[in-house]
Structure formats: structure tokens, C-alpha cells
């Protein structure tokens, strides 16, 4: 992969990832998601508006932009560029320039990126998330658990693919950092459960 190709993949991924679907969708119904709950633009906080279809749409669109970045880059420039674009999309969602680098926490976009890089690893991520979410009803705990196991599953499922495992590992570290306040609330037993309207996310 040439430097020019890498830069184009970075720009493509970042621009797609930085589209703030949660903010755009809630604004369409006259709500600023940044003034609700945690102020986060992701699907978990959109759910706190009480509008479940809007939360689902946010989840799908945030995942979709991550997947789109990977698929478009793969089609144009190959697998290495696809991975770069996916990482850039993940970064763009968390640090969108349009919102002063204050975006979402990256869970849905992480899912979309991994599904496009290796659909089996992506499905395992979703399965782990669902099991923890249904068992404990903490979105943050589900995300942290899925992210913690993703690099291992990426390595095992994708024929010991170190690059994919490393990409998942990097996103998992960053995702853990975006959830640092959630970790504190989980420790203090003050983290809101899925669907609750209290601050957190």
C-alpha cells in the first residue's frame, strides 16, 4: 500500500465515520441528543429519548458507516487499505471534527468495521454483547466484554491473522478509554441499565 493510498483510505474512513447519525436523527424530531442523558450521540443515549426506532436506526447507521468505509476501501485499494479505512472510521465516530471532536463511544462503528473485515468475528462480537446485555442489562459492560474478547476471537477465527487481531486490539483499547466513566459507575454500582433515562451511557 502506497502512502497516497493510505492517506486516501484514512480520509475516506474518517469522513464516513464522523457522520453524526444520532445527532442528525434526533434533530429531525426536534431533539438535541447532546442535551439528554450522557450527551453522547450514540444509540444507547438515543434510546434514552424513549424513541426505540430512532435508537435502532442510529445503531444500524453507525455500524453501517464503519462497514461502508471498509468495503469501499477494499474495493478501491485492497485489504490493507480496508483495515486503515475501518480504523479511521472508528476514530471519526469518536472524534468528529464537526462536533469539536466530541462524538460517540464507538461500539456500533466497531461492530460495523469488524463485520466488514471478517463477518464471523463480527457476529461473535455481537453474540457476546447480546449475552451480557440480556444477562446484566448494562450496555457498557456488554460492550467492554465484547471488546475485550474480540482480539482473541479475531486471531483464532481468522487463521491467526495478527493484523486483524491487532486492529481489534487497538479499537478495544480506545473503546475502553471512551468508557472510563462507565467503568467507574459500574464499580460504584451507579451505572444506568439499558433503557433507563438517567445520565450515563
Image (tube, rainbow, N blue to C red):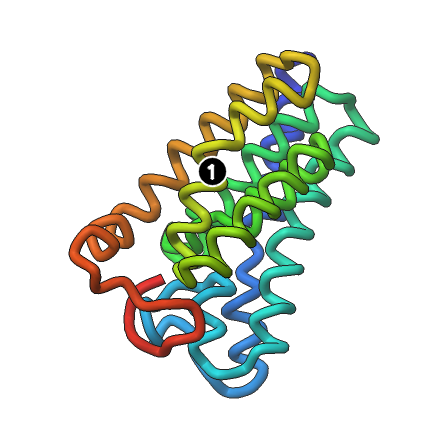
Name the foreground residue: 93 vs 96: 93
- Spot the residue most to the bottom: 30
Above or below: residue 131 compared with residue 24: above
Name the foreground residue: 36 vs 107: 107
- Spot the residue most to the right: 75
Above or below: residue 49 compared with residue 138: below
Above or below: residue 12 compared with residue 134: above
Which residue is rendered at x = 77% and y = 37% of the image? 72
**Quarter of the image that includes the C terminus:** bottom left
On screen, residue 82 versus residue 179, left or right, reads: right
| Residue 175 rendering spot, x and y as whole percentages | 41, 41
On screen, residue 134 versus residue 114, left or right, reads: left
- Spot the residue most to the left: 188
Which residue is rendered at x = 48% and y = 48% of the image? 106
Q: Judge the density around disc 1: few (<14), some (14-19), many (≥20) Cα neighbours within 10 Å.
A: many
- The reply to whether residue 15 is visible in this rendering is no
Q: Number of labelled discs? A: 1
Which residue is rendered at x = 46% and y = 58% of the image? 135
| Residue position for label 1 | 147
Which residue is rendered at x = 55% and y = 21% of the image? 165
- The reply to whether residue 122 is visible in this rendering is yes
Name the foreground residue: 139 vs 95: 139
**Quarter of the image that includes the N terminus:** top right
| Residue 146 rendering spot, x and y as whole percentages | 49, 41
Determine whether the residue tagged by mark 1 lies in a helix, strand or loop. helix
| Residue 167 rendering spot, x and y as whole percentages | 54, 25
Q: Quadrant of residue 170?
A: top left
On screen, residue 196 versus residue 118, left or right, reads: left
Amino acid at each position: 500500500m502506497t502512502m497516497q493510498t493510505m492517506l486516501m483510505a484514512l480520509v475516506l474512513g474518517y469522513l464516513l465515520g464522523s457522520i453524526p447519525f444520532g445527532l442528525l436523527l434526533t434533530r429531525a424530531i426536534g431533539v438535541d441528543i447532546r442535551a439528554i442523558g450522557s450527551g453522547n450521540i450514540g444509540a444507547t443515549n438515543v434510546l434514552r429519548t424513549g424513541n426505540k426506532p430512532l435508537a435502532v436506526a442510529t445503531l444500524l447507521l453507525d455500524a453501517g458507516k464503519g462497514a461502508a468505509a471498509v468495503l469501499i476501501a477494499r474495493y478501491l485499494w485492497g485489504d490493507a487499505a480496508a483495515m486503515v479505512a475501518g480504523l479511521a472510521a472508528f476514530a471519526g465516530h469518536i472524534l468528529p471534527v464537526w462536533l469539536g471532536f466530541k462524538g460517540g463511544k464507538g461500539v456500533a462503528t466497531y461492530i460495523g468495521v469488524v463485520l466488514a473485515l471478517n463477518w464471523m468475528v463480527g457476529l461473535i462480537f455481537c453474540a457476546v454483547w447480546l449475552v451480557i446485555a440480556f444477562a446484566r442489562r448494562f450496555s457498557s459492560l456488554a460492550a467492554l466484554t465484547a471488546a475485550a474478547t474480540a482480539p482473541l476471537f479475531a486471531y483464532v477465527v481468522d487463521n491467526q491473522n495478527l493484523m486483524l487481531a491487532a486492529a481489534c486490539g487497538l479499537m478495544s483499547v480506545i473503546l475502553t478509554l471512551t468508557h472510563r466513566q462507565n467503568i467507574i459507575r459500574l464499580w460504584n454500582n451507579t451505572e444506568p441499565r439499558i433503557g433507563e433515562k438517567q445520565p450515563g451511557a
